[in-house]
Image (cartoon, rainbow, N blue to C red):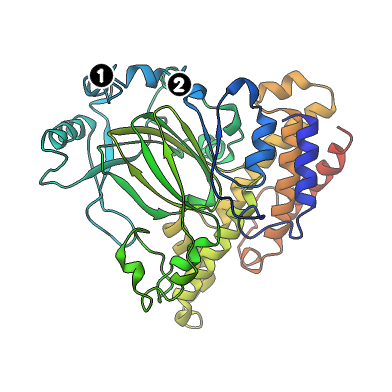
Amino acid sequence: MDRETRTFAERYYRGLRDPVPSGGGGGPTPSGVTFIQTPDTFSYADFVKGFLLPNLPCVFSSAFTEGWGSRRRWVTSEGKPDFEYLQQKYGDAVVPVANCGVREYNSNPKEHMSFRDYISYWKDYIQGGYSAPRGCLYLKDWHLCRDSLVNDLEDIFTLPVYFSSDWLNEFWDVLNVDDYRFVYAGPRGTWSPFHADIFRSFSWSVNICGKKKWLFFPPGEEEALRDCHGSLTYDVTSTELLDTHLYPRIQHHSLPIEVIQEPGEMVFVPSGWHHQVYNLDDTISINHNWVNGCNLPNMWHFLQQELQAVQHEVGEWKDSMPDWHHHCQVIMKSCTGINFEEFYHFLKVIAEKRLLVLEQGLKGDSGDSQSLGLGLQQAAFDIGRLADVLASVVVNPDFQRLDTSAFSPQPKELLQQLEDAVTAAEAL
């Protein structure tokens, strides 16, 4: 991020009425999705101003990924998955596989199998006319990056600069236990039910081979797709939606924005946009979920909603259960993957690196700052966004109920450090 882009972004957020917005990017609903053709004429600043800040989807042409090793090695000359290479390279890996033909709540049940067995199933499925007794199985959420050596990853893909400010994976890499980088692979007909991405993260998805159809709904549009019990639909193409007794708000439903993603193309999925995705061919994709200063407020708003939902569900035991608020946090973490305590730890880890970069930059040690993999202007922008959200966190009544005595630094101390850094960064 350069100085001009940082200034533009900071003015954008100052122009919002609420420093911690509650949903999407605001503005009119787009009628289509922008296609970005040429890498040479599209900068990081262009992406920030045109798509990241307004929270709008876009599609990058295959020119942006033409140098990726996976597009050469994982794919045959006919553009199909190279089963022989993939089986030889990754056959022993254990992968999660979802059954697209079985509904389990608003998702699909998963099992684990070796990648070799999945490839065998996939080939049989094709030979059977895209049908098999086991059903339609989709390899989803395979943590190939987490389970691979760094040198191997460099031969698979190169992280696009547009998505390089990735706090979610930065945090999990520090913990060294998980990540949000995935491979999806499956035959024609596999699909993902209606959903928004975890923690209201951004995501990007590249088709290594094959073709996908995306159905996008801007933030807020999903409300018309809730049934009379408040649950979101599982399938936006289901005839169930014609039942106005079951879906009383369906008359307010708008048609989705449809995107066909070709081989090699890269889709940017904005924060809080619900979507449903189909594989139109035998398809392999690489996908990352990511959070940064632009959608951090959406993540915090989502976590507050998740806690409120838990509190509602167990509300009848509030007076009789000792440490009811603590138990709500425990339940929230088991359901959502993170609670308020871990969210503070997330903010702290991200903040400390940026405070260090800013300190070194103010001393003129720009080389040291760059060695931390973060530019000075990006660090300054991030600190401002962290300060805005942490200011909301520390006054949240449920956060104030946490036992923070072991937190180091204390939340208010970290907030003061961030606010002091924001003041110091104004001179940059």
- Against 170, residue 71 (above or below) is above
Identify the residue shown where x is 37% and y is 39%.
212
As helix, strand or loop, the secondary structure at mark 2 comes to helix
Residue marked by disc 1: 85
> Which quadrant does the N terminus fall into?
top right
Q: Which numbered disc, 1 or 2, marks the residue that appears first in the sequence?
A: 1
Please identify the quarter of the rendering in which residue 220 is found.
Answer: bottom right
Three-letter code for the amino acid on which mark 1 is drawn? Tyr
Q: Nearer the viewer, residue 270 or 214?
A: 214
Residue 31 place in picture, x, y as percent: 55, 50
**How many numbered marks appear?**
2
- Against 318, residue 305 (above or below) is above
Residue marked by disc 2: 150
Going by the picture, which residue comes out furthest to the front?
31
Residue 206 place in picture, x, y as percent: 44, 32
> Which quadrant does the C terminus fall into?
top right
Identify the residue shown where x is 45% and y is 30%.
265
